[in-house]
Image: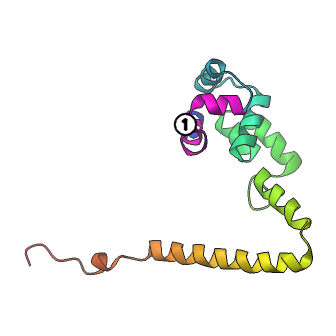
Amino acid sequence: MTFQEWVNGLIQRRFGTATALASAIGMQLSPFTRGVAAGTLNLVNLLKLARVAEEAPAVVLKLAGKAAEAELLESLYGGPGRDTLTPAQREFIETWEHIPDEVREHFAVLLKYARDVADAAERKAAAPRPHERHRRVAGR
């Protein structure tokens, strides 16, 4: 995936327009689109882009052709993966820590239920549909 493709996907999934995404990182549309197309967005704007995309900064930097900067960040803070939290995840944990223990227990039950529902939906989506199990052979 190219950086431009990633940015276009981000626009479609989360922002609706390039203007909205540019504005979210504090840029005007023209310099933003020119920077994306030419690969000339600076490090600060790429980090802002990672923040609004809730993506690991190293991932965005690598997509934008800034591998050396990405490797430096990873050497300092660790690479993207299970140990790296998005801003939304950090906010959730901070909120969780302020909830009284007796309330946490109730939320824990709800979260487990939500995970079980999601797992069941994934299994159902992955299972073959009845009409796909018994396909007719052509000519019969």
Q: Nearer the viewer, residue 79 or 30?
A: 30
Q: Position of residue 120 (x, y in %)?
A: 54, 78
The colouring scheme, among rainbow, by chain, secondary structure or one colour, is rainbow
**Tag 1's secondary structure?**
helix
Instruction: State yes or no: residue 16 in magenta.
Output: yes
Q: Position of residue 124 (x, y in %)?
A: 47, 76
Instruction: State yes or no: residue 14 in magenta.
Output: yes
| Label 1: how many Cα within 10 Å (few below 14, some 14–19, many 20+) | some
At a point 53% along the width and 41% down the height, the residue shown is: 12
At a point 35% along the width and 76% down the height, the residue shown is: 129
Q: Nearer the viewer, residue 122 or 3?
A: 122
139 relative to 99 in the view: left or right: left
Q: Residue furthest left?
A: 139
Q: Nearer the viewer, residue 4 or 111?
A: 111
In the rendered image, the quadrant that contains the N terminus is: top right
At a point 54% along the width and 37% down the height, the residue shown is: 5
Instruction: Identify the main secondary structure in magenta.
Output: helix
138 relative to 67 in the view: left or right: left
In the rendered image, the quadrant that contains the C terminus is: bottom left
Is residue 140 something that shows in the picture?
A: yes
Question: To which residue does mark 1 refer?
Answer: 8
Q: Position of residue 115 (x, y in %)?
A: 65, 74
Q: Amino acid at mark 1?
A: Asn
At a point 60% along the width and 39% down the height, the residue shown is: 15
Count of labels in the image? 1
65 relative to 125 in the view: left or right: right
The answer to which image quadrant residue 138 occupies is: bottom left
Classify 96 as above or below 9: below
* Start-end of magenta stretch: 7-24
